[in-house]
Amino acid sequence: MVPVGRVVAARWLCVRCTLRKKADVMWDGLNSRQRSYLLACFREDQEAERRARTARSTYQDPGPASAWRKLPFSIKAELPFAECTTIHRRLRDDGHLDAGATLHALARRGLLKITEDRIDVPEVGLVTRVVVELTRAGRACARAGLGIAPAPRRPKHLLSEWLWGSLARVAAAGPDGLSEDVMGGKAKYYLGTDYRPNGKPSRGYIDCFANHAVTLTAIPPPRPACLFRPC
């Protein structure tokens, strides 16, 4: 009899290989201009991810990935800086910038999403901005083109580095607790009791008091299963 764990591991590896093959096929089907567009968006996406990690390392909340992964692409206005986003500059320097057909071709392939929002420009007023967001398939395709292996993902039951660091600081503060101001960000809402960040129960690791100090909970929460829900 084959152990169940070995079967599960084999199926997981099979799925990973299948997804990687799909990314390779998708990359092979792109022309040079489409590849340049995808890689320009991918590099800016990775830079946004790096900024989010840096924020977490300093106990700041960068917000949800659905927000910081949205990348400015261009501004629909007759302004000198209308096309001076980072992505546009990369495409212009590579000589691959076009009127927008390539961007929509990538969207039709499911590699990125295109949306628009409105921003306030000083001395101009509200203008329309084009925003792009790479999908998981888009990031996988870009990694396949660059020959980069996907980074291992943190298991969902583990705390992020940001939350683990916040919890360690509370523990180091001892019975006197740690000031909420020192924690920063929204860590207390994920680690505390009786909160529901993003609609999910908080971990119940710390208590918050009226004197704006936080300490470790005296007893574990009554339902251990809740401790292992992702943040």
Image (cartoon, rainbow, N blue to C red):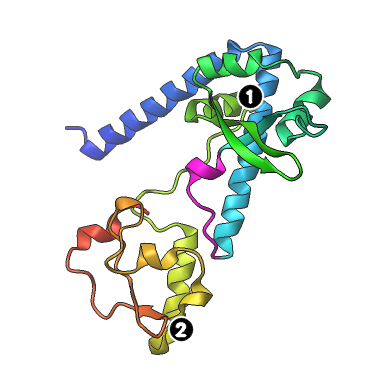
The residue type indicated by label 2 comes to Ala
Of all residues, the one furthest to the bottom in this rendering is 176
Q: Quadrant of residue 211?
A: bottom left
Q: Residues within 10 Å of mark 1 (few under 14, many from 20)?
A: many
The residue type indicated by label 1 comes to Leu
Are the residues tagged 2 and 1 within 8 Å (C-beta)?
no
Magenta stretch mostly in which secondary structure? Answer: loop
- Classify residue 126 as left or right of residue 78: left
Distance CA(mark 2)–CA(mark 1)? 47 Å
Q: Quadrant of residue 26?
A: top right
Q: Residue 81 at what x, y percent from top left?
A: 79, 34
Q: Nearer the viewer, residue 35 or 13?
A: 35
Q: Is residue 183 above or below residue 46?
A: below
Q: Nearer the viewer, residue 220 or 66?
A: 66
- Classify residue 192 as left or right of residue 83: left
Q: Secondary structure at mark 2?
A: helix
* Residue annotated with mark 1: 38
* Residue annotated with mark 2: 173
Q: Residue 132 at what x, y percent from top left?
A: 58, 30
Q: Earlier in the sequence, mark 2 or mark 1?
A: 1
What residue is drawn where x is 61% and y is 56%?
54
Q: Residue 129 at what x, y percent from top left?
A: 64, 32
Magenta residues, start to end: 59-69
Q: Is residue 202 above or below residue 52?
A: below
Say which quadrant the C terminus sits in. bottom left
What residue is drawn where x is 34% and y is 69%?
192
